[in-house]
Image (tube, rainbow, N blue to C red):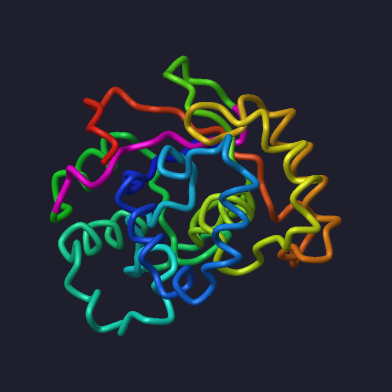
Amino acid sequence: MISFALMKLPRSLNAAYERSPVVQQNLDEFRSLRGAFKMVDPGAYRGIERCPLSEMPEPDPGWIQATVPDTLTNVDERARQRLLEILGPTHECEHYPCSLVPMLTQARELMRLVDRPEEYEIVRLSHGESSGARLLGYDVGYWGGGNYSILCDSVIWPMWHGPGPEAFDGLALHIECLNAHALFPDHESADRFRSFYVKQSWAETEDVTGEFSVIRIEGTAEPQTALV
């Protein structure tokens, strides 16, 4: 299965997260987490939990409880309307809101319609099929939409099921291999992390076995925008 998505660039998302109510209300825990995983640059994260263009607008990481939904209604409105047309009136996806389109040409069309294209990049997502394009790495999370990565929620921008200090040593054994994009370098290391994560008492649980997918993320032929 191969799809494309418009993902926001990570530097601004990381800055928004560090200012967010989630962090400001849990500063000691945040500082402890960052101190434990100094080898990871959260501002370099190129995974799936980056507020992709989807059928419903979503706030930046850490702001969901502090954002009035109506304030996001007009953000990327033209692109969102076109996304809904591409998906079709009876569309379904494994997780909502849906954010994936099947063709690169459609993703490029959506890029032309977003309010600020400099905030996004197009990525190719698959369950492991290589296109020969530049590999960014592997993430683990929901396929189809939902804006959720168990990697991101563990060590990048924890919001729902972040680990306590007692979990740091076990996590570090899996996280130390992350590449320059704060992603797993291969399918095997991502799958090992998934197997570790689902056994943790502090972690999010799967509704069905295999719900957390290992997802290959590749760049596209789009000109690369500075990661700010």
Q: Is residue 80 above or below residue 125?
A: below
- In-image side of 201 versus 158 (left or right): right
Look at 34% across and 60% down and name the residue there: 16
Q: Is residue 172 above or below residue 129?
A: below
| Residue 19 x %, y % | 36, 65
- In-image side of 167 versus 24 (left or right): right
Hey, which residue is sitting farthest top in the picture? Answer: 132
| Image mark count | 0
| Residue 88 x %, y % | 35, 61
Look at 54% across and 29% down and name the residue there: 137
* Depth check, front residue: 18 or 118: 18
* Depth check, front residue: 102 or 51: 51
| Residue 1 x %, y % | 56, 37
- In-image side of 186 versus 216 (left or right): right
Q: In which quadrant will I find the C terminus?
A: top left
Look at 65% across and 25% down and name the residue there: 186
| Residue 102 x %, y % | 41, 42
* Depth check, front residue: 117 or 41: 41
* Stretch of the chain drawn in magenta: 116-128
Q: Is residue 174 above or below residue 211?
A: above
Task: Assess whether residue 163 is covered by the magenta stretch.
Answer: no
- In-image side of 174 versus 133 (left or right): right
Task: Assess whether residue 118 is covered by the magenta stretch.
Answer: yes
* Depth check, front residue: 110 or 139: 139
Look at 17% across and 72% down and name the residue there: 74
